[in-house]
Image (spheres, coloured by chain):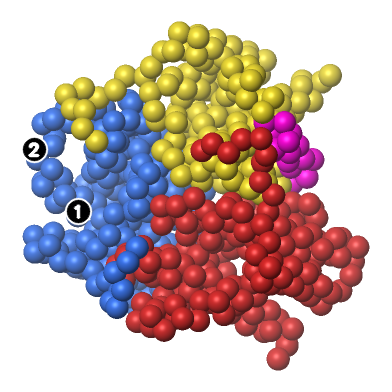
Chain colours: A yellow, B red, C blue
């Protein structure tokens, strides 16, 4: 496989995994088939859509190439019909989700720099690509985004995207971006296993 | 009237009806005059805004031509002052809303194809144009989008938009798009009358 | 200082104040450090992002120049560590927030007209720039936007932006835009002090 087709394959895998997480939230919220498919699509493609709209890379790849749309639909249908089985392997889905996050923070940062952004905004766009889909999912499902709720999720994505942006800024070859992806992946997996939490404000505990 | 001015008139009618549905939700949520007007505008124009931003047709028509903005403002003021009377004819508003949905799924798909999208993403954009305003309305009003909640609403819009996209792809003249609109309209009206529901995931009923 | 650098300084001050309001909501909702920073960024930059995406001024200034991003991060960190002290001066923060609102409604309207919008949509974009960040903040924090809830907030912003748009339309020099900003500022401050409320729909009080 060429590097490009590897990137596209990984991208599609990331969309698939994120779409599954959206579909499972929809099922837990007792939404109908359509709600499941829309939450699958919004979660799988939403982060990339936000990035593409902000960096003016419109129409987003998923709208220019319809095969992209098959991926969240397939993930949504799979969850709709097989969710009792999937619930049993949810821990493994979290691991796949960490892969998706790592991949999206890398590809998001690279795409932002290709569209002329500097390294700092590009790192931010990488993080947004990774976490944006989940935020849209949670807003549509009527809950505060879980990414805000303690679990260490966004920081690894930002760190990974920052590494990619710095390497790119110093003219390093593209495959070294894998370092950023690995950093995000390992950090996220260790955080999952050890249940690391992000710091919370002190001095006050009222809502 | 020319075909173009018919299309624009129908578009404005669709915006008006959708804006009324937004204003009525705002009134039921006890929002103030401003909230009523903003929900009216977001519901009437939001679906088109999402489509235009994604297909890079910015600024959206409603911002390029200020007369578009009069429509949701008028609908919002009408509801603000006359909502007790309107509540009595809510069933008829649902019928008008079905017209708006049918129209938006057709015009949304046509516009997306005019901006170079293929038939599958164009059908998706048609559906988004039809349901996007209502989704923004519900998120701003602090509830899970009703379009996810069982009632058959998005599927007719997607079906109508798909018919339009396929006809367009095979070079059929534009007025045949009315077939897609009719399909959406009839399906939605029958679903309303017979209270058809979209399928829900089985095997689990917890929230 | 040149007029341009004054405008940029005021813009950064507005972002800072709005970012603080976002961070304080996040702290009150017991979000983690990341949630605080994201709500700070979304509140400080969100209104401008919505405007820039709609008028096709992408990528937004805050993504083209990374120094913009330092402002909400600083505001977020300040609130994260000093929020007990800040809670005591919250009334003064409301006054600063009124400055931010006045500034954003002016700069938002000017930017929209520079990108070719007419005066009516430009006034709307000015208002959106002023209130959009707070709306995103509230949706992400899981509450109905406060701007809908009685307090007089959006109307002053719309009025200020409308004055700017009309003056610009009649070829008046740019510094007269300060009239619009002053109108918004004074109106908002008096509304704060006297607790003015926007009108609510009559005839019905059920939710």
Question: Residue C88 got which mark?
Answer: 2
Is A78 one of the magenta-colored residues? yes
In the structure shown, which secondary structural element does the residue marked by tag 1 occupy? helix
In the structure shown, which secondary structural element does the residue marked by tag 2 occupy? helix
Relative placement, left or right, of A110 versus C137 is right
Structural crowding at the residue carrying mark 2, measured as other residues with C-alpha within 10 Å and reported as few (<14), some (14–19) or many (≥20): few
Which of the 4 image quadrants contains residue A202?
top left
Relative placement, left or right, of A21 versus A197 is right
Q: Which residue is mark 1?
A: C99
- Residue found at the far bottom of this picture: B1
CA distance separating discs 2 and 1: 19 Å
Foreground mark, 2 or 1, reads 2
Relative placement, left or right, of A77 versus C180 is right
Residue sitting at 72 percent across and 31 percent down?
A82
Q: Position of residue A131 (x, y in %)?
A: 51, 31
Relative placement, left or right, of B195 versus C119 is right
The reply to whether discs 2 and 1 touch (Cβ–Cβ < 8 Å) is: no
Residue range (magenta): A64-83
Whether marks 2 and 1 lie on the same chain: yes
Q: Inspect this view and state whether residue A122 appears.
A: no
- Viewer-nearest residue: A123 or B35: B35
Q: What secondary structure characterizes most of the magenta part?
A: helix
Q: Inspect this view and state whether residue A144 appears.
A: yes
Q: Position of residue B99 (x, y in %)?
A: 65, 75
Q: Position of residue A164 (x, y in %)?
A: 55, 19
Which of the 4 image quadrants contains residue B57?
bottom right
Structural crowding at the residue carrying mark 1, measured as other residues with C-alpha within 10 Å and reported as few (<14), some (14–19) or many (≥20): many
Q: Chain of mark 1?
A: C
């Amino acid at each position: 496989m060429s590097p490009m087709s590897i990137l596209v394959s990984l991208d599609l895998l990331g969309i698939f995994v994120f779409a599954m997480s959206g579909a499972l939230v929809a099922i837990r919220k007792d939404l109908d088939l359509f709600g499941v498919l829309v939450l699958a699509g919004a979660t799988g493609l939403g982060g990339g859509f936000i990035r593409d709209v902000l960096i003016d890379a419109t129409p987003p790849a998923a709208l220019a190439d319809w095969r992209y749309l098959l991926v969240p639909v397939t993930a949504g249908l799979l969850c709709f019909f097989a969710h009792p089985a999937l619930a049993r392997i949810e821990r493994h889905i979290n691991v796949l989700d960490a892969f998706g996050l790592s991949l999206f923070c890398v590809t998001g940062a690279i795409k932002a720099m290709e569209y002329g952004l500097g390294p700092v905004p590009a790192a931010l766009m990488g993080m947004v690509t990774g976490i944006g889909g989940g935020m849209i999912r949670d807003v549509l499902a009527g809950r505060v985004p879980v990414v805000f709720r303690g679990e260490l999720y966004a920081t690894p994505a930002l760190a990974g995207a920052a590494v990619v942006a710095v390497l790119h800024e110093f003219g390093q070859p593209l495959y070294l971006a894998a370092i950023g992806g690995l950093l995000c992946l390992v950090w996220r997996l260790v955080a999952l296993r050890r249940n690391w939490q992000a710091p919370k404000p002190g001095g006050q505990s009222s809502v």
